Image (tube, rainbow, N blue to C red):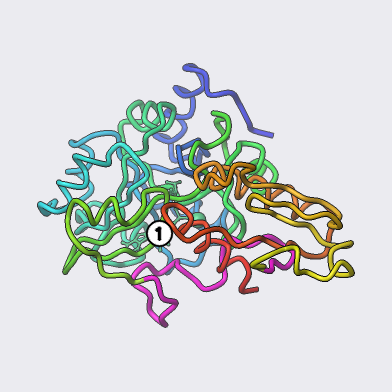
Amino acid sequence: MPVVPATSENIDRAAALLRDGAVVAFPTETVYGLGANAFDARAVARIFEIKARPAFDPLIVHVSGDAMLAGVTSGVPPTARTLIDRFWPGPLTLVLRKNENIPDLVTAGLPTVAVRMPDHPIARALIERAATPVAAPSANPFGYLSPTRAEHVAQMLGERVDLILDGGPSEHGIESTIVMLEPHPTLLRPGAIPAEAIEALIGPLAYELSDAAAPLAPGRLAHHYAPHIPVRIVDDPATVPVAERGDAALLAFSDPVPGYRVTRTLSHTGDLREAAAHLFEYLHELDASGVVRIDVQRVPEEGIGIAIMDRLQRAARG
Ligand code: TXA
Ligand code: MG
């Protein structure tokens, strides 16, 4: 397996690989990304191939500074600047007008590009040393659970990736929040930064989270983030008949009940941030545990809990 610890030498090696058109998996504060030089259409094409990602689903471009941002976009509106000043580096992706140098493959032919500056020392060092913006989706096969550990990437994509930098578990465990700025500020994906924090700065957001035929974020499909076995959302696991528990797994929020073959608890104290950090990790474990179904206890839809339920609802729509 091409997994290596993210030492300074290995970050240099990964940066050189990116410059040479290779595909490298790397840690971010949200989930692991599968990166290629954003200006290299051939390298970016390999990302789509490795993930079996449909070409209509555009990628997020990761930058390490303002100069790089300027090379990716063609203008940053004042609302975007306000959000950048407050939330970057961090788990906020902004959809801005694209620079003509960005290949159409990256943006799926859209006139816009999604950009973020990750808040992870390894990701930032990698982008800086590669000296090029890095296009990177989450490092999982299209539609499957996102990776929050290097081992997840190795298990799912293995030798197809040129190098996997291991930087330990992802801090947030859930993807970035995506906001489109024009024609008016719109939330496209709930994520690690709660929408309220954004609205507090720039006013109300329009919500475009539907599964409309042509969603504004083309990759936001109704069925996504899913394990191989079925997922069912339950309000209160204690009401699930005991007969249905024996061959299933329970992903409890805070209150496990007996009778399930396997149980994981997202946060024993009911802390939503802790729950988000464990979400994909536990789903990976339960998916591989030999049960026939995963019952997931509903979490409160507040703060990052909104992003957790967004992922779970899509996972459950099998
Ligand atoms: O936290 C994250 O955002 C992670 C890490 C690796 O940065 N990345 C991630 O990428 O979640 P991905 O490819 O799994 O999700 C990207 C989403 C997709 O739903 C895609 O449709 C949307 O971003 N997107 C990308 N470019 C867009 C654009 N120009 N307009 C609207 N949506 C866009
Ligand atoms: Mg993804």
- Asked whether 302 falls inside the magenta stretch, the response is no
Mark 1 C-beta closer than 8 Å to ligand 1: no
Q: x%, y% of residue 155? A: 70, 44
Quadrant for the N terminus, please: top right
Is 192 in front, or is 266? 266
At label 1, which amino acid type do we have? Pro
Q: x%, y% of residue 265? A: 68, 47
Please name the residue shown 58% across and 63% down the image.
Answer: 312
Name above or below for residue 64 compared with residue 157: above
**Residue that sits furthest to the bottom in the current view:** 213
Principal SS element in the magenta part? loop
Does dot 1 land on a helix, a strand or a loop? Answer: loop
216 relative to 267 in the view: left or right? left
Q: Residues within 10 Å of mark 1 (few under 14, many from 20)?
A: many
Is 229 in front, or is 219? 229
Over which residues does the magenta segment extend? 209-232
Snapshot quadrant of residue 184: bottom left
The residue pinned by badge 1 equals 190
Snapshot quadrant of residue 216: bottom left
Name above or below for residue 86 compared with residue 250: above
